[in-house]
Amino acid sequence: MENKLREAFVAVGRDVRERKTVSGRAFLIDGRAVGQFEERGGVLRARLWLGDKERATFESRATFDRESGWLHVVSDDDVRFIASLVPAAYKAASSGKASPPGASTVEMPTRPDIPVEAKKKGAASPRRPSARPTRSR
């Protein structure tokens, strides 16, 4: 599946540059992202930088993860779907109108404010001993 995704990105234009990432590949045109895919934890996932209309189609896919903004690639049908959107991502990146898929904002629990005591003037703050070995002079 990774090879088919790579071929789709490379075939879209001669000016597409491929860059290795830590766990996958990214594809750029004139320094702007077209898309990327990676494998993490045995799961292949992809992301495309698209215009608004195509991004809505991408995000409506059943395997799209709203929390991360990645589309999980679980079948050859997903590969064909992504490959069909790569030309639109290329066009959007070429024009500078591309944007990444939206990751939802996850609400983090908040803790109540904890009052902080004002420091007294002249009070020394506790210091941890240095972990570095000392040399005699």
Image (cartoon, rainbow, N blue to C red):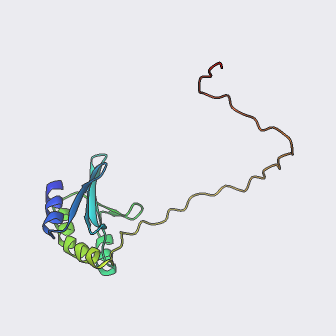
Q: Quadrant of residue 64?
A: bottom left
Q: How many numbered marks, from 0 up?
A: 0
| Quadrant of the image containing the C terminus | top right
Q: Which residue is drawn at 45% across and 66% down?
A: 104
Q: Quadrant of residue 13?
A: bottom left
Comparing 39 with 29, the one in front is: 29
* Above or below, 108 relative to 89: above
Kindly tell me whether residue 1 is visible in this rendering.
no
Q: Quick one: quadrant of the N terminus? A: bottom left
Measured as percent of width and height from the top left, residue 105 is found at 49, 65
Residue 63 in view: yes
Residue shown at the point (28%, 77%) measured from the top left: 92
Residue 33 position (above or below residue 119): below
Quick one: 5 or 104, which is closer to the camera?
A: 5
Residue 120 falls left or right of residue 88: right
Location of residue 106 in the rendering, given as x and y in whole percent from the top left corner: 50, 62
The residue drawn where x is 31% and y is 70% is: 49
Image coordinates of residue 131 in percent, x first then y, are 60, 27
- 84 and 15: which is toward the camera: 15
In the image shown, does 123 or 75 lie closer to the viewer? 123
- Percent x, y for residue 112? 71, 56
